[in-house]
Amino acid sequence: MIAAILVMALLGVLLGSILGYSAVRFHVEDDPIVEQIDAILPQTQCGQCGFPGCRPYAEAIASGAADINRCPPGGEAGIHKLAELLGVEFKPFGDDAAPAKPKSVARIDENTCIGCTLCLQACPVDAILGAAKQMHTVIDAECTGCELCIAPCPVDCITMVPVAETVSNWRWKYPVTPLVQVHH
Amino acid sequence: MDIKGYLLILVGTVLVNNIVLAKILGMCPFFGVSKKLETAVGMGAATTFVLTLGSGTSYLIDHYLLGTHLAYLRTISFIVVIAGIVNFTEMFVRWASPVLFRVLGIYLPLITSNCAVLGIPLLNVQGQHDFIQSLLFGFGGSVGFSLALVLFAGLRERLEGADMPVIFRGTSIAMITAGIMSLAFMGFAGMVKP
């Protein structure tokens, strides 16, 4: 009885101290700024910034390896938020980043679609409906226009269709005034 | 024990007495994590790591700490030790290799609830294995687990796109597949002549 209690206590103390020690020894500091940047990015994982996803891009911004103006799905609003968070100047989309395209959504030509589900797997936001050997279609409201579904389609039946400006989606355009150096 | 004996343990645990398909242990992750091939590989790797370490440590605890007169503490102390090892592994992998942590990270806590991880140390005691044999038995058992898991995940990915009656879809066909796989693995029993 006493031996059993002692053995279990010994085990508990031993494991507890090993875990306690390793919690201190192997402590990993999470970079909170990366989390915050990642929270602003749209999480479409589209790779248009040149990084394999939103989190790698967030890490690159945090380490200073990438500019804040490389995320087309985030739009100018996203750049403004990033600029505010990091305390830097707002920058319009850079020349090297993908040029800002008119907001468009993917459209599947349903007569050509063979129902292979390849575009379903590529879609980062699950905006494509369909099943194997069934016709697929895109939910316009969910599509972010990242174009990731275009490459995998074996019959090239996906096209990008610009969203027409209607009363319901019109927004006031952010005024862009080129900055001019003023000499005194 | 010579090399031949060690090889026999390895082949025996991986193929003949496969922990999942012959001993029916570790069914929870076998069905839970086998929907995708990538997750199956990750889970298999994490289990292999923990199980090899766990069976070695459990042997030491059973042999040097518990002995014969405290044998009734075996199960509870193994559970405590395995939970401790899983936690330690998680912290260590996170510190040592963030890349590996991102691959294995979410599976590591799941291993605590894998009954094969407790089953193998207990089978070690039952089989009166020595230290090296225990390590080999743990490693072989977990390689067998990974093999079964990866094969099963591959089959399930194929089944996902197959045209089959509604009544069979999902878990039902998975159960039937697991049964047929189990039967197939029973065939390995004829490989070793007693």
Image (cartoon, coloured by chain):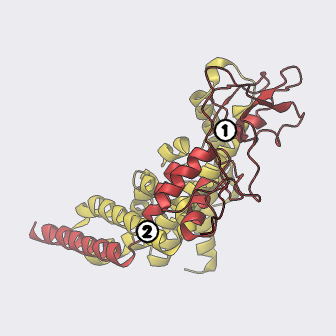
Q: Nearer the viewer, residue A114 or B27?
A: A114
Asked whether, in this view, residue A31 is left or right of residue A89, the answer is left
In the image, residue B49 above or below residue A48: below
Residue at x 88% of width, y 37% of height: A154
Callout 1 touching callout 2 (CB < 8 Å): no
Q: Position of residue A30 (x, y in %)?
A: 43, 66
The residue pinned by badge 2 equals B89
Asked whether, in this view, residue A180 is left or right of residue A149, the answer is left
Q: Nearer the viewer, residue A72 or B111?
A: A72
Q: Position of residue A9 (x, y in %)?
A: 17, 69
Asked whether, in this view, residue B11 is left or right of residue A10, the answer is right
Q: Position of residue A42 (x, y in %)?
A: 58, 45
The residue pinned by badge 1 equals B156
In the rendered image, the quadrant that contains the N terminus of chain A is: bottom left
- Which amino acid, by three-letter code, is at mark 1? Arg
Chain letter of disc 2 in the image: B
Q: What color does chain B have in the rendering?
A: yellow
- Which amino acid, by three-letter code, is at mark 2? Thr
Front tag of 1 and 2: 2
Residue at x 20% of width, y 74% of height: A10
Q: CA distance from mark 1 to mark 2?
A: 30 Å
Estimate how packed mark 2 is, as few (under 14), some (14 to 19) or many (20 or more) residues with alpha carbons within 10 Å. Answer: many
